[in-house]
Amino acid sequence: MEYWDIYDKDKKRTGRTMKHNDWCLKDGEYHLTVLGVIVRPDGRFLITRRVKTKSWAPGWWEVPGGGVRAGEESREAVIRELKEETGLDVSGCGDGYLFTYHRENPGEGDNYFVDVYRFALDFDKADVRLQEAETDGFMLADADQIHTLAEQGIFLHYNSIRSAFELPLQN
């Protein structure tokens, strides 16, 4: 069973944990997730498509990410999630941290912080190894293509992370 730390409104660990996806958080309590934007030297981004069996946003496009495990640091989590979901290792790419945003979902028990990272990595399509339980495809897309998917309503978190696609290539 995977556990997540519970954080307070200041993004500090409370010392308590919750079971993965056990939406039991009270108002003012949060869990922490990460998103990893990977950009190639040609300016294209790796995006993945969620499997159609997902209960939330099946078939939508996104950047890889996931929950930060109890005791795990944010950067460790994004490196792990990217490796698990795409087969790509960004551990040598520098810090990559861009910003954090949060969501309040009163009464749903699912309040969360999201740490957003961006890594510059030179890789080929053949290097990508998808985690089939999570994704059923990927695309190397430029910022305009991602914006188009967002306008179609099929790209997760776009309004919260759009600046990650608009930054200059150096990371």
Image (spheres, rainbow, N blue to C red):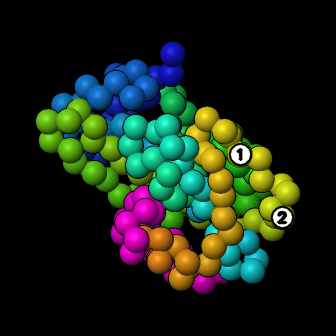
Magenta-tinted stretch: 151-171
Q: Quadrant of residue 21?
A: top left
Q: Which structural element holds mark 2?
A: loop
Q: Quadrant of the C terminus?
A: bottom right
Amino acid type of the residue tagged 2 in the rendering: Asp
Per the image, is 154 magenta? yes
Q: Earlier in the sequence, mark 1 or mark 2?
A: 2
Residue with the mark numbered 2 = 124
From the viewer's perspective, is residue 166 above or below residue 78? below
Q: Residue at x 68, y 40 (%)?
A: 131
Dots 1 and 2: beta carbons under 8 Å?
no
Residue 14, percent from left and from top? 32, 29
Query: In the visual, does 31 lie left or right of 83?
Result: left
Query: In the visual, does 92 lie left or right of 34?
Result: right
Query: In the visual, does 28 lie left or right of 68?
Result: left
Amino acid type of the residue tagged 1 in the rendering: Leu
Q: Residue at x 63, y 47 (%)?
A: 136
- Extreme front residue here? 52
Q: Quadrant of residue 117?
A: bottom right
Q: Residue at x 25, y 25 (%)?
A: 24
User: Is residue 146 among the parts visible in the rendering?
Assistant: yes
Residue with the mark numbered 1 = 130
